[in-house]
Structure formats: structure tokens, C-alpha cells
Image (tube, rainbow, N blue to C red):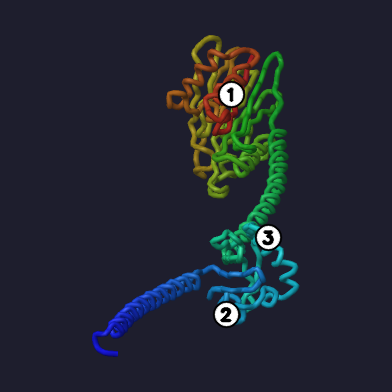
């Protein structure tokens, strides 16, 4: 071959063509290498994300073989990845568990369902924990389901909280049942106690010379108000009303004790025809220092029909109201402090002539101390006016007064005990 010949030129052309082809191949090889590196980096990132994920993840093919498991699953069950990947589900968890518990769920997922359940597993170390298990069908580019993705989330804390709540609800239910039983017993006892207190109250009196009517409504089942009247002898009628501070059982017991002392006249060295002696006797027995700071406001009056007079003594109680004919009512204020406050207090009494017909009202502060619609408190003057305008022989004003006061209260009941006596001297 001679230089410049056609054969020489053709050789150089062939070499140049080959060189360019080699350069192209080298460029493609370089691109493929970079692509492989990019793929490896993507794979590494994917594995990092999957392994860093707190939930347990698996990838299972149609032969029930594990192709992928993440670090969380291996760590939870104390197994190396090599012990799971490439093994069937039956080989990992046992043939019986696979057939009875797992296979049906995976098969349903291969049919296109997403399957979810909650289950318990014993993990490495022997601890039993609760998990939410989900199986998702994995589809390739041709939309064929080729694998199942298993995602298992530890829900132990939530389940334990739910079980603790359920236990608490059950304990609360039992406690409520016990409470209802106890309340039923208590209410039964309170009803019996209320009936007993009511049995101590006297029957109304209605004869040609005297008519006594009354109404008592405790603000709770038992209250601190009580009253009574009885003949001391043929010519002396004792009439009394008491209001013990507070409400409920303690106030009621204190009130009943004082009431029985008057009803059965068992105060030592006391002439029950003299009101000041009666208050002195009660004061000696019912000192508030000996009775949980309970004191008594009250009236004790003695009516003598032969003399046509009433002798009375009040202890820190709202005034007596006396109506005679059509004249303005007369107030008789209490001149003594409450019973039980001062041990050596000197109690005093008063007297007034009835002089024929008269109506006397004895009442507790619950018979007038309510809020009016304008925000003010009803006064004794308001009570006087109401009794003046509603008073009749039948005594309807007592019921009308209670209904008025109850109407003024939004709850339809009074906050304090309501007690009033009407003594109609004919």
C-alpha cells in the first residue's frame, strides 16, 4: 500500500469512523455509569427512608415470599434480615399460623382489596404489644398486582389507653350503681326522718274560740324550721316557732331537739307559762359552743284566754304581726339575742292585751326574704301589706304567699325554709 493511494485513504477513513464509534460508545458507557450511580443513590435513599420509618414494612410476592423487610420489623421481632428475606411467610411464622390467620388476608389483597385489622404480637423479649396491620396491593406499570405491601403500626399506647378508659368507665358504672343504691337508702332515711319531723307538728285547730293554721316547706328535704303549740293547762296555750341556722340534717336535728324540749316541757327549773324562763332554759341547754356553732332564733308566746292577753319573748327573730279589726298591723320586735349565743344573757318578755278578736302571725325569715323582680329584697313591710290585702277567714293568704314567693324564684322553689303560723283569736 503506497501513501496517498485509495486504499490508504480508505483505511484512515475507517479508523476515523471507528474512533468516532468508540467515542460514542465511551460516552454511552459514561452515561450508563452515571445512571447506575443515580439509581444506586435513589435505591440507597429509598432504603434509608424505609428503614428509618417507625412502622414495620414488608413486601411479599405472589409466592408468599418476603422480598423486602425494613429495620423496624427486624428489630421488633429480633430477627436478622437474612432470616426473613427469601423465605415464605409460612417459613417465618409457621405453617399453621400462615394457613389459619395470614393466607386468607394476603389472598384477598391479591384480589384487589385493602385489608386492615388490629392484632397482638409477642415481640423480642417476650413482651406482648398491639398493632394495626394493613395489607395493600402493589400494581406494576401494567396495573397487575404483583406484590403485597404490609404496613404494621404499633398502637400499644393507644390500646392500653382505651382499655384503661374502658376499665375506668366500668369502675365508674359500678360506682354509680353503688352510689344510686346508697342514695336510695339515704333518700329513704331522709324521707323517714322528714316524716318523723312532720309527725311532731301539731294538727290545725279550729273551734269557735280559736283557729290555728300553718304551712311549712323546707328548702331541702330536712330544714331547720319547726313550730308547735299545746295547752300547758286549761288557761295557758303555748305557741312557738324556731329557726336553726343552716339547712339539712344537722339543722333539723338541732331544731327537733329544741322543739321536743318545748313540747314535752323537760327544761329544768322552768315555768313554761313564762316565756323569758323558757328562753333562759333553752339557752342553758343549747349553747352554740356545744352544738357545732348552731344557734336558734325563735318566738315563744303564751295565750291566756281568761285574761285576754298574750305574753311573749323573741330571740333574734322577725317581729310578730298582730292584726286587730281594720287597723294597721302592730309589730312586736324581738328584744333578746339568739338562743345559744351568750350563756348568761338576761332574757325579757312582753305582753299585750288582745281585747277581742285578733290575728297573730308567727313566721321565719324564709316567708319574706326573697328577691323581687326589680332586684330588691322583699321587706317585712311588703309582707304586712300582702297579708292585709289577702287575709280571710279561710286562711287562703298563707298558700297565696307561698305561691307568690315561689313564683319570684326562677327555679320555682325557695332558697330558704318557708314557715308561717296564723293564730286567729275569735
Q: Is residue 157 above or below residue 357?
A: below
Q: Earlier in the sequence, mark 3 or mark 1?
A: 3
The residue identified by callout 3 is: 108
Examine the rendering and report whether any part of residue 332 can be seen: yes
Camera-side mark, 3 or 1: 3
Q: Is residue 244 above or below residue 95?
A: above
Tell me the crowding category of disc 1: few under 14, some 14 to 19, or many 20 or more residues within 10 angstroms, Cα based.
many
Q: Residue at x 63, y 26 (%)?
A: 215
Tell me the crowding category of disc 2: few under 14, some 14 to 19, or many 20 or more residues within 10 angstroms, Cα based.
some
- Which is more toward the observer, 378 or 365? 378
Camera-side mark, 2 or 3: 3
Q: Is residue 262 above or below residue 56?
A: above
- Which is more toward the observer, 69 or 170? 69
Examine the rendering and report whether any part of residue 159 can be seen: no
Displayed quadrant of residue 407: top right
Q: Is residue 8 shown left or right of residue 202?
A: left
Displayed quadrant of residue 351: top right
Q: Earlier in the sequence, mark 2 or mark 1?
A: 2
The residue identified by callout 2 is: 81
Q: Which mark is residue 402?
A: 1
Q: Is residue 406 above or below residue 83?
A: above
Displayed quadrant of residue 232: top right
Position of residue 111 measured from the top left corner of the image (x, y, whole percent): 66, 59
Amino acid at each position: 500500500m503506497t501513501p496517498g493511494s485509495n486504499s490508504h485513504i480508505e483505511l484512515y477513513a475507517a479508523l476515523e469512523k471507528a474512533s468516532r464509534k468508540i467515542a460514542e460508545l465511551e460516552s454511552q458507557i459514561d452515561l450508563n455509569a452515571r445512571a447506575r450511580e443515580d439509581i444506586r443513590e435513589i435505591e440507597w435513599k429509598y432504603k434509608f427512608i424505609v428503614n428509618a420509618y417507625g412502622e414495620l414494612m414488608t413486601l411479599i410476592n405472589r409466592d408468599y415470599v418476603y422480598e423486602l423487610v425494613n429495620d423496624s420489623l427486624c428489630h421488633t421481632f429480633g430477627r436478622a434480615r437474612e432470616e426473613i428475606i427469601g423465605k415464605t411467610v409460612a417459613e417465618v411464622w409457621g405453617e399453621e399460623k400462615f394457613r389459619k390467620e395470614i393466607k386468607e388476608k394476603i389472598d384477598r389483597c391479591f384480589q384487589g382489596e385493602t385489608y386492615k385489622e388490629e392484632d397482638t404480637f409477642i415481640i423480642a423479649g417476650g413482651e406482648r404489644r398491639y398493632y394495626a396491620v394493613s395489607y395493600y396491593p402493589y400494581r406494576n406499570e401494567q396495573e397487575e398486582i404483583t406484590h403485597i405491601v404490609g404496613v404494621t403500626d404499633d398502637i400499644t399506647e393507644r390500646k392500653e389507653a382505651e382499655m384503661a378508659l374502658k376499665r375506668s368507665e366500668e369502675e365508674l358504672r359500678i360506682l354509680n350503681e353503688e352510689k344510686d343504691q346508697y342514695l336510695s337508702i339515704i333518700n329513704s332515711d331522709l324521707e323517714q326522718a322528714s316524716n318523723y319531723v312532720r309527725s311532731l307538728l301539731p294538727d290545725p285547730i279550729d273551734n269557735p274560740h280559736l283557729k290555728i293554721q300553718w304551712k311549712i316547706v323546707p328548702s331541702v328535704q330536712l330544714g331547720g324550721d319547726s313550730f308547735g303549740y299545746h295547752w300547758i293547762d286549761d288557761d295557758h296555750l303555748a305557741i312557738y316557732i324556731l329557726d336553726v341556722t343552716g339547712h339539712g340534717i344537722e339543722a333539723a336535728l338541732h331544731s327537733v331537739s329544741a322543739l321536743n324540749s318545748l313540747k314535752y316541757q323537760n327544761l329544768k327549773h322552768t315555768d313554761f307559762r313564762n316565756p323569758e324562763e323558757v328562753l333562759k332554759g333553752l339557752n342553758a341547754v343549747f349553747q352554740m359552743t356545744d352544738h357545732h356553732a348552731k344557734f336558734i332564733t325563735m318566738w315563744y308566746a303564751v295565750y291566756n284566754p281568761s285574761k285576754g292577753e298574750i305574753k311573749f319573748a323573741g330571740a333574734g327573730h322577725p317581729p310578730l304581726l298582730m292584726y286587730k279589726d281594720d287597723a294597721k298591723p302592730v309589730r312586736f320586735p324581738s328584744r333578746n339575742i339568739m338562743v345559744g349565743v351568750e350563756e348568761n344573757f338576761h332574757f325579757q318578755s312582753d305582753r299585750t292585751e288582745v281585747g277581742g278578736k285578733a290575728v297573730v302571725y308567727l313566721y321565719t325569715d324564709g316567708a319574706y326574704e326573697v328577691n323581687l323582680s326589680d332586684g330588691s329584697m322583699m321587706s317585712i313591710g311588703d309582707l304586712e301589706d300582702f297579708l292585709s290585702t289577702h287575709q280571710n277567714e279561710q286562711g287562703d293568704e298563707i298558700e297565696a304567699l307561698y305561691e307568690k314567693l315561689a313564683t319570684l324564684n326562677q327555679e320555682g322553689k325557695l332558697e330558704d325554709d318557708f314557715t308561717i303560723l296564723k293564730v286567729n283569736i275569735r
